[in-house]
Amino acid sequence: MSARRLNPRAGVTLLEVLIAVTLLSLLTVGMFLALRIGLSAFARTDSKLMENRRVAGAQRIIDQELEGLIPARVNCGPPDGPPGQPAILFQGLSDTMTMVSGFSLQAAWRGRPQVLQFLIGPSDQGEGLRLMVNETPYLGPVSSGALCTGVVPDPQTGIGLPQFLRPSAGPATFVLADHLAYCRFKYLTPGSLPGQPPTWQPGWGSAGWPSAIRIEMAPAQPSVGQLQPITVTAPVYINRVPEVMYTDR
């Protein structure tokens, strides 16, 4: 058998190699750009979803804290001093609110009662306001008496209302809502005359507790495609008289 003769023109030219490498490079770049666009869209969607979950969770926390209001009392005065004047541990102002709730941020409904102090302050980025809350365990009327500075009669009703230390932001302060255009507290107050409907007031100046508590707020920069903080209204499920000692018969 004679040996097969090789064709001197068989093979791949340099131009064909350059064209193949160029096409492969373009295909790789296109796949990389498509992957990058997909990952960027996923990151934006995940960021919006997490932000929506955070806003919804904060709204739910506010509602549960307000609905968990407990009819607690306090002896206004330091624990190591003389017995203080007994008062109801509740103060409602337009920019701060002090109360006792059975719902806590650490243990939800399973923890011990907490003294909640809501406050409003400027945002850390200098844009709008933020709603914050401080939590301290409620250990009884005597231990919590250090928060109360005294009992002052209301100028309009003459009812003695407890005055508490004004809360301030600290390392343990929890931010419930941020970048707000406005934020204020209102309290559903019964009518002063028989048959008069209740009204929302910027301050609570009566004994006991209001029928409902409202925290009005709105975002500084509303966004159509993102969940925004909204006004929270929570009823107060307390119908007992604080001055009456209830006993079993």
Image: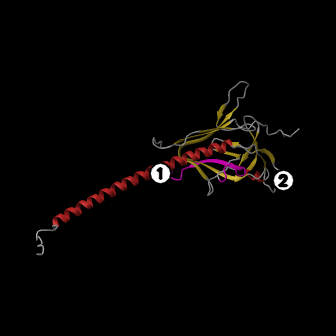
Distance Cα–Cα, label 2 vs label 1 = 54 Å
Looking at the picture, how far across and down is residue 161, in whole percent? 75, 41
Residue 114 magenta-highlighted:
yes
Q: Could you say which is closer to the camera, residue 121 or residue 67?
A: 67
Mark 2, residues whose alpha carbon is within 10 Å: few (<14), some, or many (≥20)?
few
Q: Could you say which is closer to the camera, residue 226 or residue 242?
A: 226
Region in magenta = 106-128
Looking at the picture, how far across and down is residue 25, in whole percent? 26, 61
User: Does any portion of residue 83 appear in the rendered image?
Assistant: yes
View extreme (right): residue: 249
Residue located at (65% from left, 35% from top): 201
Residue located at (62% from left, 46% from top): 61
Residue 8 lies in quadrant: bottom left
Q: Comparing marks 2 and 1, which lies closer to the viewer?
A: 1
Query: Dot 1 corresponds to which residue?
Result: 47
Which sits earlier in the primary sequence, circle 2 or circle 1? 1
Query: Dot 2 corresponds to which residue?
Result: 82
Taking 220 as reference, is 30 above or below it? below
Q: How is this picture coloured?
A: secondary structure
Magenta: predominant secondary structure element? loop
Taking 186 as reference, is 192 above or below it? above
Residue 20 lies in quadrant: bottom left
Q: Could you say which is closer to the camera, residue 191 or residue 46?
A: 46
Mark 1 secondary-structure assignment: helix
Residue 4 lies in quadrant: bottom left
Quadrant of the rendering where the N terminus is positioned: bottom left
- Three-letter code for the amino acid on which mark 2 is drawn: Pro
